[in-house]
Image: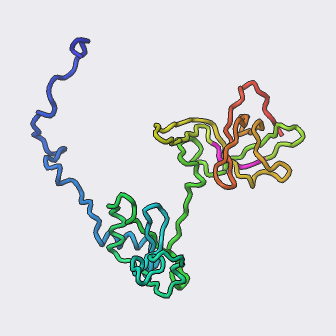
């Protein structure tokens, strides 16, 4: 910077003495909150996801969750430990392991790298009562997705589907429309690839019986803009992603 005649302060800020402690605490270590999971924290967490305590499931090393039995590793009692094929529900020696606050602490701490300290709770109590519900929305919000249109609601944008085959009349549908959709694709031993495109997610139940498929080459009109469907990709069961290309301003709009 000196050679380029660029002015800059030459004092070392790390050597400056701190005289005013009103905005800086010299004892920074004391400001670090404890990261230990206490039994009180575990109980507060379980209070929000209150399920059965007479049985719980545990994550396996290769994924999946398995109900825990006190006799699971006893080869004198457990048929599965002896290599026999038998469901735990059919075993006369089954003794479900009870869920304790210590296991919840281990679950929240997550010390094991293989994830085998992760547990699952059974929300339906023996008397048929369920004290909490969990909604999984990640299959409907386009994952991983950052773009315009999310705030407008899922499948809440009105659009006009225009078949390229003139034998079929255009029809109204509801779509999840994103003009700045970004998708991150992970590839083995490669850096993540991010692509930005215009996309509309369409539920197949929106399509009429006489035109059940979303076809490449068809068109989609959103407000006063018409888009060409240049590709159709599977998204989730019952939903497909239409990759769109915006027509130029001089292209004629379709008015039903």
Q: Looking at the figure, which quarter contains the N terminus?
A: top left
Q: How many marks?
A: 0
- Residue 226 lies, in percent from the top left, at 73, 34
Q: Is residue 57 visible?
A: yes
Kindly identify the residue that appears in the image at 50 percent across and 72 percent down: 132
Residue 61, image quadrant: bottom left
User: Is 173 inside the magenta-drawn segment?
Assistant: yes
Magenta range is 172-177
The percent position of residue 50, horizontal first and vertical second, equals: 44, 75
Side of 94 where 108 appears, left or right: left
Asked if residue 91 lies in the magenta stretch, the reply is no
Of all residues, the one furthest to the right in this rendering is: 167
Identified at 83% across, 48% down, the residue is 211
Indicate the position of residue 71 as horizontal and vertical percent values: 41, 81
Magenta: main secondary structure: strand
Q: Does the rendering let one see residue 130? A: no
Q: Is residue 244 left or right of residue 254?
A: left
- Residue 140, image x and y in percent? 60, 54
Q: Quadrant of residue 254?
A: top right
Residue shown at 33%/67% (left/top)? 106
Q: Is residue 131 left or right of residue 227?
A: left
How is colour applied across the structure in the image? rainbow
């Amino acid at each position: 910077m000196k050679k380029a005649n660029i002015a800059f302060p030459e004092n070392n800020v790390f050597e400056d003495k701190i005289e005013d402690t009103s905005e800086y605490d010299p004892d920074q270590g004391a400001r670090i909150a404890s990261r230990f999971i206490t039994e009180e924290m575990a109980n507060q967490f379980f209070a929000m996801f209150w399920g059965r305590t007479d049985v719980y499931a545990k994550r396996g090393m290769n994924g999946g969750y398995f109900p825990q039995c006190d006799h699971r590793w006893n080869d004198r009692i457990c048929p599965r430990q002896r290599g026999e094929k038998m469901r735990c529900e059919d075993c006369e020696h089954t003794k479900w392991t009870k869920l304790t606050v210590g296991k919840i602490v281990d679950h929240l701490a997550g010390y094991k790298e293989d994830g085998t300290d992760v547990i699952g709770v059974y929300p339906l109590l023996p008397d048929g009562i369920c004290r909490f519900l969990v909604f999984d929305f990640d299959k409907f919000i386009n994952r991983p997705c950052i773009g315009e249109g999310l705030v407008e609601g899922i499948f809440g944008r009105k659009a006009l589907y225009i078949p390229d085959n003139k034998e079929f009349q255009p029809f109204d549908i509801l779509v999840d429309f994103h003009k700045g959709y970004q998708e991150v694709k992970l590839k083995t031993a490669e850096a993540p690839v991010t692509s930005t495109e215009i996309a509309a997610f369409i539920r197949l139940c929106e399509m009429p019986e006489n035109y059940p498929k979303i076809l490449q080459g068809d068109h989609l009109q959103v407000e006063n803009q018409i888009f060409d469907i240049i590709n159709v990709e599977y998204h989730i069961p019952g939903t497909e992603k239409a990759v769109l290309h915006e027509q130029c301003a001089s292209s004629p709009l379709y008015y039903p």
